[in-house]
Image: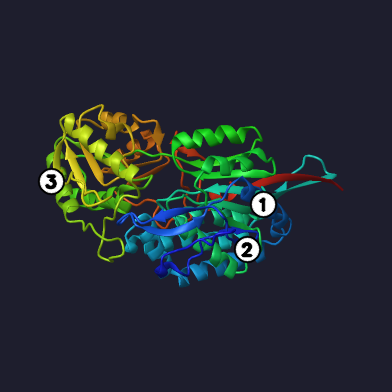
Amino acid sequence: MTQTPTVRPELADVPTGAFIAGQWRALPRTFTVDTPHDGSALAQVADCGPQEAVDAIEAALVAFDTWKLDNFKRAEILSRWADLIDEHAPQMARVMALEMGKPVTEAHGEIGGGNGYIRFYVDAARQIAGERVPSRFAHKRGLTRSEPLGVVYAVTPWNFPMSMIARKAAPALAAGCTVILKPAEQSPLTALLLAELWRQAGGPAGTLQVLAASDPASFSKPFFDDIRVRKIAFTGSTDVGRLLYAQAATTLKRVSLELGGHAPTIVFADADIELAVRESIVSKFRNAGQTCISSNRFYVHESIAEQFADAFALAASKLKVGDPLDPATEIGPLVDDQGHAKVSAHVADAVERGAAFQTGGQTLTGRYFAPTVLSGVQPGTLMLREETFGPVAPIVSFSSDEEAVRLANDSEYGLAAYVFTRDLSRAFRVTEALEYGIIGVNDGGPVGAAAQAPFGGFKNSGVGREGGHWGLDEYLQVKYVSFGV
């Protein structure tokens, strides 16, 4: 007998089934989504497996035949989707706060930024075109067509339940692709709500499908095995990204991967310390440090290291930790017990190696961790080598520009970096030397509400770009046509 998934009464309007071929489907298998605030159950969500994956692929292929034909119709539906998201923003922000612990005020910001991507690609959809290609022969004419790749399998993480979907689905749908989305099992409710709003916007059956799964490996296998699925778009860990890259190779799928980050922040002696502190609070503590572009390592010139550490710690100590549904909350809980354990282990390792607390350092109730600033962090410390993914800021001093760049580049990752200086020449030299795809100079939020900008990294931080025309190009293929006249 099919079990109807359930939710808490306050989430009664949020769907919990599988959205396949334009319909909500209940399944006999479910898994539990809890709230990081206190660990209590929020919902039982339909748990999809390989058969549901196959059903979604078939529906996406049928939908692709007509969806790819009309750029302007796609733009109209995407625009209605964006309008509905704006209308339901309060509800969606509450869902995000409950299922992954993001402060509700931040959730509203994420929804606005994510909707900015959708509206950017509304305009981009209308402008997809080809080019005239000159010929050396008088009796020939050449042109190109930009055509959608086909069926896209998108996998999104838990830390940005709305905007990560928008950054993938919006350009793919605008290009004329059909999208099958697997949201993270920690935060699927936002994705399911987005699917319902897509249905209400008039999105044709099979164009956007959302299926949650507790066993991502077995669920995903049909997508990698089927040559008709032409694109994989993934945001997550580098280790998983490597596996997906290898699996996609057997059918030569197009792949875009946004993977791990370990962002350095360099504060030079001539920096505006007040500005550096203010912007670093944003880059470090947004979403409790659970972002791929979060500042993970702070390299501060030795002449100002103590001054910066004192000011930064004071600002961090004033951040309000609390219930993510409270509009005054600035730091919510970590998403799960595993994440909390990693943060605790990193802090313990740093202290054992000689680091000193400037502020914080303690576990609070449940999955909460106090905003923490550490000084005197030693080489080899775990948090200088791995993403902590929590509200912890290690400070290391340096003595020369060359040393700062060397320390910043000493990582397998290359997603984001931050530089604070008032010297324009130094800013150019350092940004050119840093091996990172995104750099904020005197700016702790370089990609905030920047749908027109490219988002992506170097080295083991991924392949491809999201945002701007770069994001659209990821879902298009070019056809050359030569005419004899």
Whether residue 104 is visible to the viewer of this picture, yes or no, is yes
Residue found at the very far bottom of the displayed protein = 87
Disc nearer the start of the sequence (1/2)? 2
Q: Amino acid at mark 3?
A: Asp
Of 148 and 107, the residue lying toward us? 107
Give the residue pinned by disc 1: 55
* Residue 466 position within the rendered picture, expressed as x and y whole percent measured from the top left: 50, 48
* Residue 92 position within the rendered picture, expressed as x and y whole percent measured from the top left: 43, 65
Residue 10 located left or right of residue 64:
left
Of 88 and 275, the residue lying toward us? 88
Give the residue pinned by disc 3: 310
Of 176 and 276, the residue lying toward us? 176
Disc 3 from disc 1: Cα separation: 57 Å
Residue 146 located left or right of residue 457:
right
* Disc 3 packing (10 Å; few <14; some 14–19; many ≥20): some
Disc nearer the start of the sequence (3/1)? 1
Which residue is at a point 20% across and 29% down the rendered structure image? 378
* Disc 2 packing (10 Å; few <14; some 14–19; many ≥20): some
Disc nearer the start of the sequence (3/2)? 2
Q: Give residue 23's mark.
A: 2
